Image (spheres, rainbow, N blue to C red):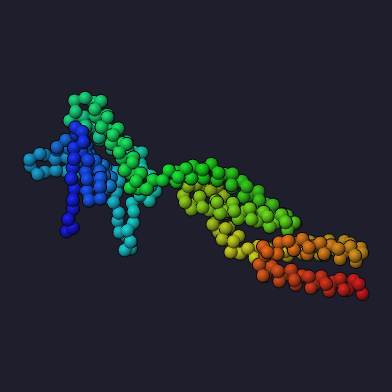
């Protein structure tokens, strides 16, 4: 069994600090026979009968860890890094009751309870790694997520209806950025998204199947262009319409995949044959 070092030092009536090998490990409030210990393993209530060796200790809040599948699994409180308000209220009530057994002044008991509360906050904030930035990020996510969902839906609608490559590619970038933000806050557990689709599935398709999305857009616009030239009477007008179609994609060649560029090249070859036939 490994050696353990622990020393208790009285710092005030009814209050002792517990010192271990790595420094301060907690605080004990109360007198011999009954008290509250606030330490790395949570808050414990300790009771005993002096001189008999009989004692009882029970955990009020906090928790250690359990092993699952060969790995250390943290307790739910440690995973969420949030303290239960009910546990805090119960702990404070017990502290007041225990303290009032040893102090005639109820005000002193209240003071001890407040001291325990403050000490518990700082200890748990450190032990459970409660990051104020995480709490702020959660609050901001809850405020921003509804706005992001609205913007996402608006851009998704534009993406489906636009016939302009400039608008398509710019909106595509925006919607991927919004989907990334929404997926991040949803996966972090900050918000529950009110959406008809799985944002993670959408993001996966938007990023990993971007070539397919662009290919469908190119094909849609090419079909529209063919219908437009059927309505034109002169070969020059038809040729100009074809040139405008391919010119509209040139500024965005760096955003397209090889498959998309090959699709445009095949359409260009087909149009060249059409133009040659008009000239003849």
Q: Is residue 87 visible?
A: no
Relative image position of residue 184 (x, y in whole percent)? 51, 52
Position of 21 with respect to 188 (left or right) is left
Place residue 59 in its image quadrant: top left
Position of 245 with respect to 151 (left or right) is right
Relative image position of residue 260 (x, y in whole percent)? 69, 68
Question: What residue do we see at 48% from left, 53% from top?
Answer: 187
Question: What residue do we see at 90% from left, 71% from top?
Answer: 278
Question: What residue do we see at 83% from left, 74% from top?
Answer: 273
Q: Quadrant of the C terminus?
A: bottom right
Relative image position of residue 72 (x, y in whole percent)? 32, 58
Q: Is residue 121 visible?
A: yes
Q: Quadrant of the N terminus?
A: bottom left
Question: What residue do we see at 55% from left, 45% from top?
Answer: 145
Q: Is 205 located above or below residue 275 in the figure? A: above
How many numbered circles are shown? 0
Place residue 233 in its image quadrant: bottom right
Foreground residue, 13 or 66?
Answer: 13
Foreground residue, 169 or 20?
Answer: 20
Q: Residue pushed farthest left?
A: 51
Relative image position of residue 186 (x, y in whole percent)? 50, 51
Place residue 264 in its image quadrant: bottom right
Q: Is 261 located above or below residue 199 in the figure? A: below
């Amino acid at each position: 069994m490994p050696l353990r070092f622990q020393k208790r030092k009285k710092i005030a009536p009814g209050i002792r600090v517990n010192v271990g090998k790595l420094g301060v490990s907690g605080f004990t409030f109360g007198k011999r026979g009954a008290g509250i210990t606030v330490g790395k393993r949570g808050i414990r209530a300790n009771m005993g009968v002096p001189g008999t060796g009989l004692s009882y200790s029970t955990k009020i809040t906090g928790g250690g860890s359990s092993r699952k599948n060969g790995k250390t699994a943290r307790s739910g409180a440690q995973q969420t890094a949030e303290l239960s308000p009910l546990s805090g209220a119960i702990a404070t009530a017990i502290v007041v009751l225990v303290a009032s057994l040893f102090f005639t002044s109820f005000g002193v008991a209240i003071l001890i309870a407040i001291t325990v509360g403050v000490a518990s906050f700082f200890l748990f904030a450190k032990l459970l790694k409660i990051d104020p930035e995480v709490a702020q990020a959660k609050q901001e996510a809850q405020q921003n997520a509804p706005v992001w969902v609205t913007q996402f839906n608006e851009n998704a609608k534009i993406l489906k209806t636009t016939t302009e490559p400039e608008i398509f590619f710019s909106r595509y970038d925006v919607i991927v950025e919004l989907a990334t933000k929404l997926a991040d806050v949803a996966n972090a557990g900050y918000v529950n998204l009110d959406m008809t689709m799985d944002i993670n599935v959408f993001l996966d398709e938007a990023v990993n199947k971007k070539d397919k999305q662009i290919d469908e857009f190119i094909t849609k616009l090419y079909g529209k262009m063919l219908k437009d030239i059927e309505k034109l009477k002169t070969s020059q007008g038809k040729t100009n319409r074809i040139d405008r179609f391919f010119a509209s994609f040139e500024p965005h060649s760096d955003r397209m995949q090889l498959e998309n560029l090959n699709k445009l090249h095949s359409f260009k070859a087909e149009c060249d044959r059409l133009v040659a036939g008009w000239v003849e």
